[in-house]
């Protein structure tokens, strides 16, 4: 039986080693509003990315696809203007932006990625952006204020900045087990024994032999000191098994990822090969960002990028080892947290909705069913109205194109206010409507579905659909 790999992680408010952020007011769309952000690493980063599947793609997406194979030092993000459907001028503005930033950072522009979010069809206000770049670079820092400024600068209709970070520990071969280390008692006993042997030798041998014994003592002391130094060095090396991973995202409307209608930036100081970094991101993205939906619209600008600068000084992860699996778990933890924050901040949302499918025949079946439910406008409006209209859930499952046995499944509504069984073995129960309404009134509502037909599971996240969503999007350009 395979050994279960556990992630040892603690919440961290610090950036990974070597990274700096900044955010400034460039007046791109509105005056006196943070709207230009920078991510920077002095050390070159291995990079990986996933991009919108919308056939109409913004100029920054095209730019990044051409640059992502290089080592990356910086990402510049603007909010207020999507730079999508802007033709050749939009592409030239990307080049000008990257070249201007590269000049101030004193690097080659091929090491720079770009991201934009905002209104489609408008050209970037280049004079304002070019004027703001020197200040953007000058203010880059690794402190908490820089995180706050950068995360706010990438927002559009978001109501709060979205960040999450953890410190994790790798399972490195440098770790010493109890067999390779001495306890305090063992060390004391060894020293005492060595001391006694020295006295016996000196008291029983001739002066000539005593000189030889002193020489032996010195050798023993030298070996002891050398061993202790090795142990101390091993302890120091253990510290290098720790790494940090930090994520920053924006997203509130036009959220139906495939990739996502969102921007996500994951930073880590772990040392890992580019190939495995891309493989890890592609896998985790399908389980997290691609499992959220606010309104069913896929943006022209969506992307998630991971940068790894190796500043943690761990042994480079170049194979699918235990350390690789630990990194994937850490990456998933950060991505899940950011995905839930995006779903919670859906435009006009009053509830975060989590759909959990378990005991499915396959992962794809579980993902498809859960995504269909959180993507249903009828389900969303029912949650907004605190209405336990479970028929809408079954309807969404039925048109999802993921076949399932409707005579087996169980369905439960749950929240911090309790839980209630709605469907048992495919048949609706005589549940208490008032209790169900109370459960659905919580800020976070969970729909738990057991297909009783396999071993696979998946989750998806979304939100309700309220009157405010229409209000927000009816005057988005004004």
Image (cartoon, rainbow, N blue to C red):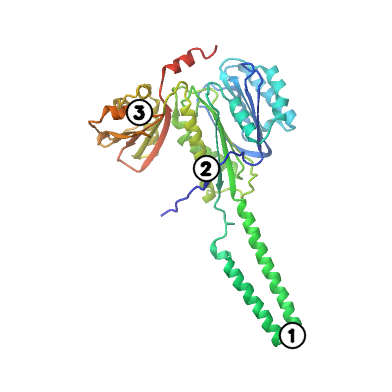
Q: Residue at x 69, y 83 (%)?
A: 201
Residue under label 1, please give it: 209
Crowd band around label 2 with a 10 angstrom C-alpha radius: few (<14), some (14–19), many (20+): many
Disc assigned to residue 122:
none
Percent position of residue 187, x then y: 61, 69
Q: Is residue 323 above or below residue 436?
A: below
| Residue 400 visible within the image | no
Q: Quadrant of residue 358?
A: top left
Question: Alpha carbon of mark 3 to alpha carbon of mark 2: how far?
Answer: 31 Å
Q: Which label's residue is closer to the chain start, 3 or 1?
A: 1
Q: 10 Å neighbourhood of mark 3: few (<14), some, or many (≥20)? A: many
Query: Is 416 left or right of 60, judged from the image as shown?
Result: left
Q: Give how far across and how far down residue 19 sits, in percent.
A: 65, 37
Looking at the rendered image, the disc whose residue lies closer to the viewer, 3 or 2, is: 3
The CA span between labels 3 and 1 is 89 Å
Label 1's element? helix
Q: Which mark is residue 330?
A: 2
Q: Which residue is mark 3?
A: 440
Please indicate, yes or no, whether residue 333 appears anywhere in the rendered image.
yes
Is disc 3 placed on a helix, strand or loop?
A: helix
- Residue nearest the viewer, comparing 33 with 114: 33
Of the image marks 3 and 2, the number of the one nearer the N terminus = 2
Disc on the earlier residue, 1 or 2 = 1
Q: Which residue corresponds to the image point at 41% horizontal and 21% vertical from the top-left?
A: 465
**143 or 71, nearer to the observer:** 143
């Amino acid at each position: 039986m395979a050994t279960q790999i556990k992630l040892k992680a603690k919440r961290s408010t610090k950036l990974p080693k070597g990274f700096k952020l900044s955010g400034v007011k460039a007046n791109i769309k509105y005056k006196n509003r943070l709207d230009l952000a920078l991510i920077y690493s002095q050390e070159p980063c291995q990079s990986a990315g996933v991009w919108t599947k919308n056939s109409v793609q913004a100029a920054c997406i095209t730019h990044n696809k051409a640059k992502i194979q290089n080592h990356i030092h910086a990402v510049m993000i603007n909010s207020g203007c999507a730079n999508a459907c802007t033709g050749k001028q939009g592409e030239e503005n990307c080049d000008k932006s990257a070249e201007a930033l590269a000049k101030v950072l004193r690097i080659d522009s091929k090491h720079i990625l770009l991201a934009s979010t905002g209104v489609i069809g408008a050209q970037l206000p280049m004079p304002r952006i070019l004027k703001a770049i020197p200040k953007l670079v000058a203010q880059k820092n690794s402190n908490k204020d820089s995180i706050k400024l950068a995360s706010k600068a990438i927002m559009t209709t978001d109501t709060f900045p979205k960040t999450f970070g953890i410190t994790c520990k790798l399972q490195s071969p440098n770790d010493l087990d109890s067999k390779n280390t001495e306890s305090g008692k063992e060390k004391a006993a060894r020293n005492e024994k060595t001391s006694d042997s020295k006295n016996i030798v000196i008291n029983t041998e001739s002066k000539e032999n005593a000189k030889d014994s002193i020489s032996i003592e010195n050798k023993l002391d030298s070996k002891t000191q050398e061993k202790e130094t090795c142990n101390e060095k091993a302890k120091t090396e253990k510290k290098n098994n720790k790494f940090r991973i930090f994520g920053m995202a924006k997203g509130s409307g036009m959220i139906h990822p495939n990739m996502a209608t969102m921007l996500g930036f994951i930073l880590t100081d772990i040392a890992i090969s580019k190939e495995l970094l891309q493989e890890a991101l592609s896998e985790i993205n399908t389980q997290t960002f691609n499992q959220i939906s606010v309104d069913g619209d896929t943006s022209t600008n969506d992307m998630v990028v991971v940068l790894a600068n190796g500043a943690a000084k761990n042994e480079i992860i170049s194979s699918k080892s235990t350390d690789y699996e630990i990194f994937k778990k850490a990456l998933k933890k950060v991505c899940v947290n950011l995905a839930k924050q995006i779903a919670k901040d859906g435009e006009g949302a009053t509830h975060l909705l989590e759909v959990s499918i378990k005991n499915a025949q396959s992962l794809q079946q579980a993902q498809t069913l859960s995504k269909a439910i959180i993507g249903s406008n009828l389900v969303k409006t029912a949650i907004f109205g605190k209405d336990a209209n479970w028929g809408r859930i079954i309807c969404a499952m039925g048109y999802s194109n993921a076949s399932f046995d409707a005579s087996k499944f169980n369905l439960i509504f749950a929240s911090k206010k309790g839980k209630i069984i709605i469907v048992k073995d495919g048949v609706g129960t005589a549940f208490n409507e008032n209790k169900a309404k109370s459960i659905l009134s919580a800020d976070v509502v969970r729909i738990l579905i057991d297909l009783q037909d396999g071993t696979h599971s998946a989750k998806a996240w979304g939100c309700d659909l309220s009157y405010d969503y229409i209000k927000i999007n009816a005057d988005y350009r004004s």
